[in-house]
Amino acid sequence: MYDQFVTRSNPALFVFLIDRSTSMVSNIAGREQSKAEFVADALNLTLGNLALACAREEGVRDYVHVAILGYGADVASSLPGGAERRSISALADAPLRLERRRTLLPDGAGGVAEREIELPIWVEPAADGLTPMVEALGRAAAICEQWVREFPRSFPPTVINLTDGGATDGDPVGAAELLRKVESDDGATLLINVHVSEAGGERLLFPVSADELHQVDDPLADQLFEMSSQLPPILVEQGASSGLSLRSGARGMTYLADASDVVRTLNLGTSTVSGR
Amino acid sequence: MSAEPIALSAPKRGAAADSNDDAYRVEPHAQARGLRRLLPRHRGAAQRVAVADGATQSFLAGRWARRLVDAAIETPMDRLEAHLETVRTGWASELNVYRDERVAAGRPLAWYEEQKAGGGAAATLLVADVRSGSVELASRGDTVAMHLRDGELLDAVPMSDPDAFGNHPELVVTIAEVPHLRRTSWSTRPSDQLVVATDALAEWLLRQAPGGGIATALDGLSRPDRFGPIIESEREHGRLHDDDVTLVVVEL
């Protein structure tokens, strides 16, 4: 399980869920930048890296398909044109624009470094409304179900949820469980939760057991732990090779993540493709 | 087994032949049979094999692999690194020519191509200089040369363990000085075989080594009409990684 090689006939699906609630307007820990702006930058960088990983001499090959759902005032696709899912070649050929930006990039040794790059922009920051995470998880499950029907032999879908708080439309644990039950022949859908912080504080990165949650003493951390998938060996190995000290059995979860943690977790979650 | 060298290559599954990022040359090659007869080995005539495996994620990897092979095929073994370094320093202008060609064709480089171009091109390289009674090897990366006698594997470089292959082989890259190549020499006897294979096929062949299975495998693989179907079948059964594959067999 979780060992299907990513090819054009067995492509990978990444679904990004972005919290766009009003609270995302405050600054992320470690940066003079709002959480919404930073998450949009980090996501644009991740999409750019995926396009680069899939680029060959004749263009970008569709090893990857992408869905992005924003949840705030509503739950809606954040892809250009509002498409529910796009191939990586379609995204690569049509960014909204290119911007010169200073941003954090993985340094290849587990850390990050600030560099100026020409950043293609697909996703704009937004922060307005509540946090309908349960609805977003349900929409993601529908996208993943459709995907595994089309590509049953593929590496299972990876869903990365970037949020700064709890759901306002019910208990997300059940919705997350339903999402993780969507399976391809190669395994169950992976759900990675990234809790972005404005305050800093006691971070909790990729815990293995619920006992580790005592150190942060927050019901939200317990909830995220329940929601998050155990990372398969291939991602634990990828994490180790990029300097993240992941242990066997680690959950795909970061609590009170600062800017660097967000970049590293996105990098890890997509390393089934970009790490090759 | 034919006494003429055999060189066969296939791209990844479902890919067009021109997207194959492996490159190879054998000189004198199979089409120049008369030339080989005119240049018997006892007069010191060498046969040269060069195989490069372009790192598919790098920009213009196949083109870089072909440049390396073209350079290696014609250069004395003791001047390989120096000549390859000259080729490497010319890569920037070659890239500019390519950029201009794309502009002229109405397809200027996209943002992702420019970013990839900045990261350079990369390929493995294996060069074999075959003479009467010896083979001299120079290599970098996981393209493998095997020395067979009576169907048995005597040696394989740079690796003989099929479990030793990984995703990050050493490479000759356009953005760093050409390093010293790994050097090996073999003493050979008439009717020994030199087999060169790029990583996926080398791993597959090395798994057949116990019990003389490489010779059996080569009997089928080295026939041009069987090569493609065997590769396809082994990929289908999950025994061979879906990668560009190249095989060169030289009877010594």
Image (spheres, coloured by chain):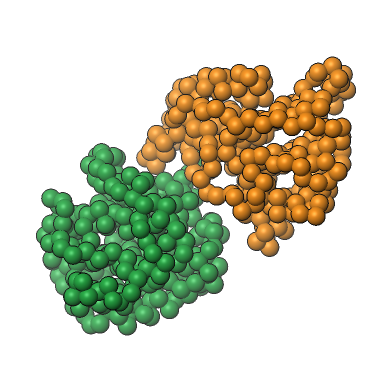
Q: Quadrant of residue A130?
A: bottom left
Tell me what residue is drawn at x 27 percent, y 72 percent.
A212
Can residue A191 be seen by looking at this rendering?
no
The residue lying toward the viewer, choosing from A117 and A208, is A208
Tell me what residue is drawn at x 50 percent, y 60 percent.
A11
Q: Which chain is orange?
A: B
Residue B123, position as x, y percentages in the image: 55, 36
Q: Quadrant of residue B185?
A: top right
Quarter placement of the C terminus of chain B: top right
User: Compared with residue A95, is residue A78 higher up or lower down, i.e. above or below?
Assistant: below
Residue farthest top in this picture: B43
Tell me what residue is drawn at x 82 percent, y 25 percent.
B132
The residue lying toward the viewer, choosing from A41 and B87, is B87
A263 sits to left or right of A37: right
Quarter placement of the N terminus of chain B: top right
Q: Quadrant of residue A190?
A: bottom left
Instruction: Look at the image and give the colour of chain A.
Output: green
User: Compared with residue B161, is residue A127 higher up or lower down, i.e. above or below?
Assistant: below
User: Compared with residue B222, is residue A85 higher up or lower down, i.e. above or below?
Assistant: below
The residue lying toward the viewer, choosing from A40 and B252, is B252
Can residue A165 be seen by looking at this rendering?
yes
Task: Give the number of callouts.
Answer: 0
Tell me what residue is drawn at x 84 percent, y 16 percent.
B43
User: Compared with residue B117, is residue B85 higher up or lower down, i.e. above or below?
Assistant: above
The residue lying toward the viewer, choosing from A104 and A24, is A104
Residue B200, position as x, y percentages in the image: 64, 49
Residue B135, position as x, y percentages in the image: 74, 29
Residue A158, position as x, y percentages in the image: 40, 66
